[in-house]
Structures are given as structure tokens and as C-alpha cells.
């Protein structure tokens, strides 16, 4: 798909590994689809927060060697190329020279020793030299009950590399530091990876995992192939983490998001809005590879935002505790529910149920292609003789049409044969 040899690459220059494994590498002599030559492209991942619930405490079980246990929040930067060898093992602390320098954790945090990254291999690869490691540079924050009963503010500060700086990534919860990654530590690893310079988008999801990707051996006699918290069969339950099913069945978990905001410095030319910027264009590449970015039922790779049309209840009243916002299309300020039981959004609101502000890009950096992009440029000044010829031709055609219309319906006079003997009226032969 679209992520193969793209995720989570953040290598701009040409290296031996990027030449082998990076799909759009800094070794490319020609820049196709509007991209620059000799500039690597990719899709690194910055996880603002991921939460693992459960009752497994620190210094026990899979968290035996760490001071942070369940529940915890993880802040991560996933990047490639990763360290190909001399890597720390899962659940173990890194030895000298095995991990990245310059990592700073906040209070009640610990290096995430449970997961250091992935080994990436794809069935379409022709050689094992195309395989690559991706690293997860991550810290975990110990959570308690208050984090699940109160609102919190999760923040990521991202500064891209420049000629004067290697950039940085800083994570905070309620203004308290969780993790600080200095770009010097990333570039200093000597792998070619850097703090991301790619245009990025925000994904919010409620993905539920039995073990959140952490490597853990199955219990004895447990096949770990089928999972069902509602089952009474031990084979369906034994593969879950401790406390997982209890959380899902007995505590009715909810995931509520109050707002999501992106702040940028309008005076900084590096801060731009959009997926295809002058420095990192992407539109033509996506248009040239549509099948990588859509499923069979999709008509186009990038779908438009649905504005209204979500199912609703005309009889529902906003403000009632038992009434969801989707049933009322938000409220009278957002939109209203039609007789056809679908939402109709007011100006300034969008989404199926009119719950989101209708935003826009103030600057369209990458305009759709036009005929000028093929090299044809229409003359900006038309010669006067061409204008005169056009005027003469126009009036000639107009006169011809008027004459034709004038003679339409007339009966033509028949031709007379001079050899015929025609008598004049009133005379005899």
C-alpha cells in the first residue's frame, strides 16, 4: 500500500540504506511528480499520546524492569531508518551506544523499554536488502485514576530542522514535560534520519488492541489465536492482558475529546497549512498513484468532507442529558434536523452532524494543473490587425444572415423559354 517503504522514513540525504529501502530517496537523480531531486521523502509518525489501560503494576511481569506500569500514556516518535544492529532487546535497558542521546523525560516518566520499533519486510520486496528497521523513540508517563476522570491537555511542540538548528519534539500533559527529543540526538545517531520536515495530518482513533503491539509470550497452553471477552471459554480469554476484559465489560469506557487545535507562527515561513507545500509537494504523486490511496469502492483517493446528511431525530431536544449531539445536529447554532431525518448545517459548521467548525486553507500552495503546465502560454496581447479582421468577419456573417432571413419565404419567378410563342393579352394571332 501507500506506506510500504514510505512509513516512517525521515531521511533527506542519500545513504546506502536509503538507496536500498526508501521508496523516494535522496539518491534519486530526477524528481518526478513535482518533487525535488536528491531529496528524500517519507511519512514519519509522531504519536501525541497513546494510552494503555490495565492493572499490571510497575516492577512486575512485563514491566519488571521499569518504574512505569499500567495504566500509562506513551509519547513516541517513530522514524526510519532505524538502528540495524546493536539494538536493545524488548524489556531491557539500552547498553552504551545502543540508543539515542539527548532524550529528556519528565516527572513520573520512563523510557519505553517495552517497544523499540519494528523490522519491516514486505511480500513485494525482491531482496532482503530492502528490509529495514524503524525505531520508536518513546517515553511512558504513569497515569492514575484522575487522568480518566478529569479533562487533560495533551500537547506536542514541533520545530523543524533548519540550517541553524536540528529541530526538536517536546510532549506535555497539562504543561508538564513528558518527553523532549533534541534533533541533535537523532542526527547524531548517524543513520540519516532527522526530525520530520514533512507536511502532516492529525489522526484521532479509538483503536483497541489486546496487547497494544507489545511482544508478550502466550500463557502456557494458550493458543492466542481467538479473542472474545464475552466468552466463557478460557482459550478465548487467555490471550488478553490482565484487566483488559474487566475494563471493557464492567467499566463502560468512554473517549471524549473537547477540542483539537493547531497553533502556528504566522511570521515563520516554515509554518504552512496544507498537505502539498512548495517545499514538500505531494498532490501529483498521489494523483499518479491513486490505487495506493484508496480501496476498491472509492472513486478518488482523497474524499471531500461530508457536510450534513448525518442521521438525526427531529423530535430530539438539545440540552437534554439523554440526548446525544448527533441526534440534534449539535444545536440551533450548528444546524437542524430536517423532516427527512438528516442534518442540515448552518454557515460555518460542517461534518455529517454539523459538529465541526468549517475551516479552510487561506493559501492554496499547489493549484490544480492547467494547460500552461504543458508549456502552452496564450498570447497576452492580441495584434490589432487580428482584432480588425475578427470585427470585419463578424459583420460580414451578420449581414449574410440578415439577407438570408429577408428572402426566406419568397417564391422565385420561374424562368421563361424565349423560343416559346407567347401571346400578348387582347390580341389574336
Image (cartoon, rainbow, N blue to C red):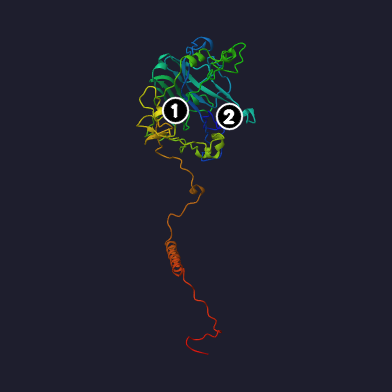
Q: Nearer the viewer, residue 422 or 333?
A: 422
Q: Is residue 93 above or below residue 294?
A: above
Q: Which residue does the numbered mark 2 point to in the structure image?
A: 17
Dot 2 or dot 1, earlier in sequence: 2
Q: Secondary structure at mark 1?
A: loop
Image location of residue 407, percent across then percent down: 45, 70
Image location of residue 177, percent across then percent down: 41, 19
Quadrant of residue 237 within the rendered picture: top right
Name the disc covering residue 360, or none: none
Q: What is the crowding at mark 2: few (fewer than 14 residues within 10 Å), some, or many (at least 20)?
A: some
Q: Secondary structure at mark 2?
A: helix
Name the disc covering residue 167, or none: 1
Residue 260 appearing in the image: no
Image location of residue 309, percent across then percent down: 44, 34
Image location of residue 371, percent across then percent down: 49, 49
Marks 2/1: CA–CA distance? 23 Å
Q: Is residue 243 above or below residue 80?
A: above
Q: Residue furthest top?
A: 60
What residue lies at 64% left-to-right and 29% top-to-bottom?
127
Q: Nearer the viewer, residue 88 or 327?
A: 327
Residue 230 appearing in the image: yes
Q: Is residue 49 above or below residue 336?
A: above
Amino acid at each position: 500500500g501507500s506506506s510500504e517503504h514510505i512509513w516512517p522514513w525521515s531521511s533527506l540525504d542519500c545513504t546506502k540504506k536509503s538507496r536500498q529501502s526508501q521508496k523516494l530517496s535522496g539518491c534519486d537523480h530526477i524528481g518526478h511528480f513535482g518533487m525535488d531531486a536528491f531529496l528524500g521523502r517519507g511519512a514519519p509518525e509522531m504519536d501525541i499520546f497513546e494510552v494503555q489501560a490495565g492493572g499490571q503494576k510497575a516492577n512486575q511481569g512485563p514491566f519488571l524492569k521499569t518504574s512505569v506500569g499500567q495504566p500509562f500514556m506513551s509519547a513516541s516518535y517513530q522514524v526510519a531508518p532505524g538502528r540495524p544492529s546493536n539494538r536493545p532487546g524488548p524489556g531491557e535497558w539500552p547498553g552504551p551506544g545502543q540508543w539515542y542521546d539527548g532524550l529528556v523525560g519528565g516527572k513520573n516518566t520512563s523510557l519505553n523499554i517495552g517497544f523499540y520499533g519494528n523490522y519491516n519486510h514486505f511480500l513485494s520486496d525482491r531482496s532482503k536488502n530492502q528490509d529495514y528497521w524503524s525505531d520508536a523513540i518513546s517515553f511512558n508517563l504513569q497515569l492514575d485514576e484522575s487522568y480518566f476522570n478529569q479533562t487533560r491537555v495533551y500537547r506536542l511542540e514541533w520545530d523543524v530542522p533548519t540550517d541553524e538548528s536540528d529541530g526538536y519534539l517536546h510532549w506535555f500533559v497539562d504543561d508538564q514535560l513528558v518527553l523532549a527529543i533534541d534533533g541533535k540526538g537523532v542526527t547524531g545517531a548517524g543513520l540519516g534520519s532527522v526530525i520530520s520536515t514533512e507536511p502532516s495530518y492529525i489522526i484521532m482513533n479509538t483503536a483497541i488492541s489486546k496487547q497494544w503491539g507489545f511482544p508478550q509470550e502466550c500463557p502456557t497452553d494458550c493458543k492466542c489465536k481467538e479473542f472474545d471477552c464475552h466468552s466463557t471459554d478460557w482459550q478465548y480469554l487467555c490471550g488478553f492482558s490482565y484487566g483488559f476484559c474487566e475494563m471493557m465489560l464492567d467499566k463502560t469506557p468512554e473517549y471524549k475529546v473537547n477540542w483539537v487545535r493547531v497553533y502556528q507562527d504566522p511570521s515563520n515561513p516554515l509554518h504552512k497549512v496544507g498537505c502539498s507545500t512548495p517545499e514538500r509537494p505531494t498532490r501529483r504523486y498521489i494523483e499518479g498513484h491513486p490505487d495506493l490511496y484508496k480501496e476498491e469502492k472509492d472513486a478518488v483517493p482523497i474524499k471531500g468532507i461530508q457536510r450534513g446528511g448525518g442521521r438525526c431525530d427531529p423530535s430530539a431536544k438539545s440540552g437534554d442529558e439523554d440526548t446525544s449531539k448527533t441526534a440534534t445536529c449539535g444545536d440551533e447554532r450548528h444546524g437542524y434536523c430536517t423532516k427527512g431525518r438528516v442534518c442540515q448545517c448552518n454557515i460555518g459548521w460542517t461534518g455529517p452532524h454539523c459538529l465541526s467548525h468549517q475551516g479552510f486553507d487561506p493559501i492554496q500552495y499547489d493549484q490544480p494543473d492547467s494547460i500552461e503546465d504543458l508549456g502552452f502560454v496564450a498570447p497576452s496581447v492580441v495584434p490589432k490587425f487580428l482584432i480588425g479582421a475578427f470585427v470585419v468577419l463578424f459583420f460580414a456573417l451578420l449581414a449574410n444572415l440578415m439577407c438570408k432571413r429577408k428572402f426566406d419565404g419568397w417564391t422565385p419567378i420561374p424562368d421563361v423559354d424565349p423560343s416559346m410563342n407567347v401571346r400578348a393579352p387582347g390580341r389574336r394571332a
